[in-house]
């Protein structure tokens, strides 16, 4: 496999600038980053370093002020919102610190929701949701709503939802940030299992050194730029 084929995501000189009155705030400053297929990458940084902004750009939730972002060789910085939504739906799974589950839906319904937007038949999406909830150990809690689940259980539902569309890339934004240490370790063990056994590409942002050490590679972000290659 060529180096080009081996790279699933590449950011080239990516800038993100916000206009704050008469001031310009640069959240990303010429960010360069490559991620290989099947890699588990952690991006570390303090609050305000630009790590969540970088993740939003990788996940096609935002477009850069200038620069290029390639996903499987396609420059997503040039796509329309409709095209970006299609890519998000098919290629990328999101895991958020706040879980972002729909409170009025059951665990099963939360997992099937992305599949509804993919026009999948009900029988097929129900089976996939059941399989995923079984995989994360929540098959007996599938009819419970988020407020009836612990934080760790909610995060596992969020992981199942992220996997529903069988995405190539999983993006995790502080996935253990709202969890106690033991539950956070359980969630990280599950992400490592996804990476090793299912060869998923995982990109995680975190401010926590111990959490970052679960990854294959750690990159440090400061003032919107990669500062130090740890390993």
Image: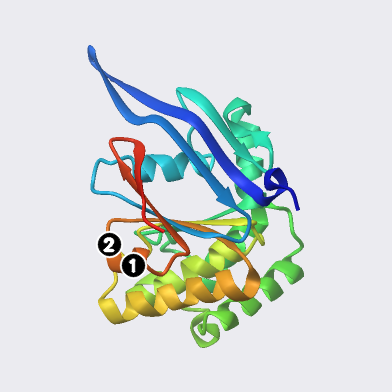
Residue at the (73%, 66%) spot, across then down: 122
Residue at the (66%, 59%) spot, across then down: 115
Left or right: where 33 falls relative to 184? right
* Image quarter in which the C terminus is found: bottom left
Query: For the residue carrying disc 2, how many other residues have a C-alpha within 10 Å: few (<14), some (14-19), or many (20+)?
Result: some
Residue at the (40%, 62%) spot, across then down: 99
Residue at the top extreme, as displayed: 22
Query: Between 50 and 144, which is closer to the camera in this rendering?
Result: 50
Q: Which residue is mark 1?
A: 211
The image position of residue 65, as x and y in percent, is 45, 22
Given contact means CB atoms under 8 Å apart, are the residues at marks 2 and 1 in contact?
Answer: yes
Q: Relative to 164, is 127 above or below?
A: below
Judged from the image, the secondary structure of the residue bearing numbered disc 1 is: helix
What is the distance, in whole Å, between disc 2 and disc 1 at their CAs?
Answer: 5 Å
Query: Between 111 and 230, which is closer to the camera in this rendering?
Result: 230
The image position of residue 212, as x and y in percent, is 36, 63
* Disc ID at residue 208: 2
The image position of residue 21, as x and y in percent, is 23, 15
Judged from the image, the secondary structure of the residue bearing numbered disc 2 is: loop
Residue at the (37%, 76%) spot, across then down: 152
Q: Relative to 174, is 198 above or below?
A: below
The image position of residue 22, as x and y in percent, is 22, 11
Left or right: where 114 falls relative to 49? right
């Amino acid at each position: 496999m060529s180096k080009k084929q081996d790279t699933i995501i590449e950011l080239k000189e990516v800038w993100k600038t916000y206009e704050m009155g008469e001031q310009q705030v640069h959240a990303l400053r010429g960010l360069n980053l490559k991620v290989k297929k099947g890699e588990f990458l952690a991006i570390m940084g303090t609050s305000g370093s630009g790590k969540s902004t970088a993740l939003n750009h990788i996940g096609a939730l935002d477009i850069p002020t200038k620069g290029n972002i390639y996903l499987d060789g396609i420059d997503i910085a040039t796509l329309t919102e409709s095209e970006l939504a299609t890519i998000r739906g098919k290629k990328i799974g999101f895991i958020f610190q706040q879980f972002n589950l729909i409170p009025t839906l059951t665990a099963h319904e939360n997992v099937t929701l992305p599949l509804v937007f993919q026009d999948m038949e009900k029988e097929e999406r129900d089976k996939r949701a059941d399989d995923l909830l079984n995989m994360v150990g929540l098959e007996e809690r599938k009819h419970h709503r988020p407020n009836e689940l612990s934080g760790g259980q909610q995060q596992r539902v969020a992981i199942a939802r992220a996997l529903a569309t069988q995405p190539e890339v999983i993006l995790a934004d502080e996935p253990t940030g709202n969890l106690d240490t033991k539950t956070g370790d359980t969630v990280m063990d599950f992400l490592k299992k996804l990476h090793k056994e299912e060869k998923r590409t995982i990109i995680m942002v975190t401010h926590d050194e111990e959490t970052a050490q679960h990854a294959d590679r750690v990159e440090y972000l400061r003032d919107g730029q990669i500062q130090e290659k740890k390993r």
